[in-house]
Image (spheres, rainbow, N blue to C red):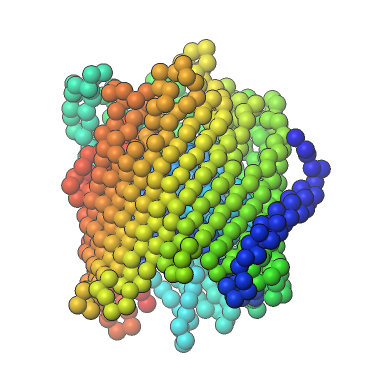
Amino acid sequence: MMRFKTPAKAAGMLLLLLCGVVAAFAQQADSVTSKDLREVAVTAPRTAREVSPGQKMQAKELERLGSHSVADAIRFFAGLQVKDYGGIGGLKTVDIRSMGTNQVGVFYDGIQLGNAQNGQVDLGRFSLDNMEEIALYNGQKSNIFQPAKDFGSAGAIYLTSLKPKFAPGEKTHLRGTIKTGSFGLFNPSLLWQQKISSKVSASFSTEWINATGRYKFSYQKRDENGHLVYDTSAYRKNGDINAVRVEGGFNGLLNGGEWSTKVYYYQSERGLPGFIVNGVFGHVDRQWDQNIFVQSSFRKDITKRYSILLNGKYAYDYTRFLAPDTARLYIDNHYRQYEMYFSMAHQYALTNWWTIAASGDFQWNRLDADLTNFSYPTRYTTLTAAATNISFNRFSAQASLLGTFVNETVKKNASAPYQQKFTPAVFVSWQPTHSPDFRLRGFYKQIFRMPTFNDLYYTEIGNRFLKPEFATQYDAGFTWNKTFANSWITQAGIETDAYYNEVNDKIVAVPGASMLSWQMENLGFVKIKGVDVKAKALWLIKKQVQFSTRLTYTYQRAQDFTDPSDSFYGDQIVYIPRHSGSLILGADYKQWEANYSFIYTGERYNSKENKLKNYVEPWYTSDLSLGKQFNYKHTRFHVTAQVNNLANQFYEVVISYPMPGRNYRFILTVNI
């Protein structure tokens, strides 16, 4: 494989290659006459129409859901599964289209949240009280003016915090919220926004969550033939959490640009209730977390055609895991992660229909741990991306090529080999008729994920010779959105996508000489076929009642084709349902609002073999909320009452981690 001596040369070669390809493609599109060309404001080219719009929820929708965290809200996106290990403080990770948690990028205000140790971002620690929008993109965000990091995931979740917006004469916004209810929950939060000048504003958000995490659950045990042999009820213990989140920052406007700086701090102590097995209902394990990061972003249109974007970040993460059960093995491990990240992106509008972009990122990661014979790894990652976009009145296309260069060093033992990979992506969107309501779309993308530090260096388990895990994605679909005038249906839309993914060299843990000795290996090969359907509508009844509906459905056939000699060859992979979906119904009448939400996850298997012993029953939950807004003098109040898991279903997202039954929550929000 060709190896470039410097990332800059790699970026240059990538850009020249991509521009040549797109130039040839543009010549083939010369049948489009000048009168058909779509006018583009080159002074702000980054606002061009998205080739492949993502699934999104705005602040108002998030508030109506009454979800506690980001993880609770994104369950309503199609093609997405949340692994929830139970309780209000349980770990919550996300899997998009069955490609694995580590293939998902999570971005907060435009900069990726990282975890080089295990590749997982706990979405439970991000509150919705300070969230303006949550967006999910399959493949990547269809915006070429972005850091190289944004091209580097099989799927991405973008979290955008609230930015201050002031009406004329306003200088200060203050909002306080108190949530209480089941599990001993006490969760106050405060948001303060201040206008400093006509172009500079500041914001401060803080939150405290304290809960016992105690709830009743049902436990059953069946034999290999599926016969019930044990059935009892108990209370979940050691599920408490005590966490504090504090974040603040500044936002500024420039002539043709903007900038922002954010500081984030999170600290928690929680019990780990563990899994229920062999009649053991309680565990005493504890975990402490501390997460700190400082990040800044700067974007400016230098000329009418040329724009620049700069990003930077420093992050520190500390985790302590304590397992004091000396009857088995006493564990008290401490982990410290350090990260520095810098990015520069450029965009240039060659014409009013053709734009090119190039970006380069550098990231430094280090992991320290007090494990025996630990390697103390440091990773240096350089990413270069070249991208281009063409946009006509009825046709748009984007192409990108990402180069990833990874080098690692260790203080002990031996380091993993140098990695250099190039991965392309192509996105297209076409309006086949004169009506803008209907569009066809599709994309192709190759991407890979690097092994984590745990995969490579965890004592006696890690394997430094692991290869990256590759994914190839194909997607084809359509969107239809229409606004109706003088009708009781004011808006309606439907989106459907069929997709096929392949994951090669999947990183898995396999037993060694004995079941007590495991090691990470590249073994897996998975084929994934699926369909995502999303529908929404807005209804206006008698000019006083507004009714909204949002529906999602996902079909997935994710099969393991690693080894034909395996007994599970061709079986559905672990914890992936074939059928899943969600429904949200909302109604507004004057100052009152009501919301009903429903989530369904079909049958699954908790092990590789799809047989009765490993069968996991479908589960569903229904949530209901009722709220009212009212004003008193210059203060606005919002009161909400919620009933979650209305039918009191006892279920498990992950086997042996029981979820709560019916529970309640009350929310009071005061805006000054």
Taking the image as shown, residue 653 lies to the left or right of residue 430, namely: left
Find the residue positioned furthest to the right.
5
Query: Relative to the observer, which residue lies in front, 516 or 585?
Result: 585
- Residue at 69% in and 70% down: 351
| Number of marks drawn | 0
- Residue at 52% in and 12% down: 513
Query: Relative to the observer, which residue lies in front, 156 or 339?
Result: 156
Query: Relative to the observer, which residue lies in front, 588 or 347?
Result: 347
Q: Quadrant of residue 109?
A: bottom right
Find the residue positioned furthest to the front.
31
In the rendered image of this protein, does residue 95 appear above or below residue 162? above
Q: Quadrant of the C terminus?
A: bottom left
Query: Relative to the observer, which residue lies in front, 54 or 39?
Result: 39
- Residue at 27% in and 75% down: 487
Residue 233 position within the rendered picture, expressed as x and y whole percent measured from the top left: 19, 33
Residue 58 position within the rendered picture, expressed as x and y whole percent measured from the top left: 41, 64
Taking the image as shown, residue 152 lies to the left or right of residue 164, namely: right
In the rendered image of this protein, does residue 68 appear above or below residue 288? below
Find the residue positioned furthest to the top.
513
Find the residue positioned furthest to the bottom.
169
Q: Quadrant of residue 178?
A: bottom left
Q: Is residue 126 visible to the viewer in this orientation of the structure?
A: no
Q: Quadrant of the N terminus?
A: top right
Q: Is residue 194 visible to the viewer in this orientation of the structure?
A: yes
Residue 125 position within the rendered picture, expressed as x and y whole percent measured from the top left: 44, 51
- Residue at 41% in and 73% down: 174
Residue 381 position within the rendered picture, expressed as x and y whole percent measured from the top left: 68, 44
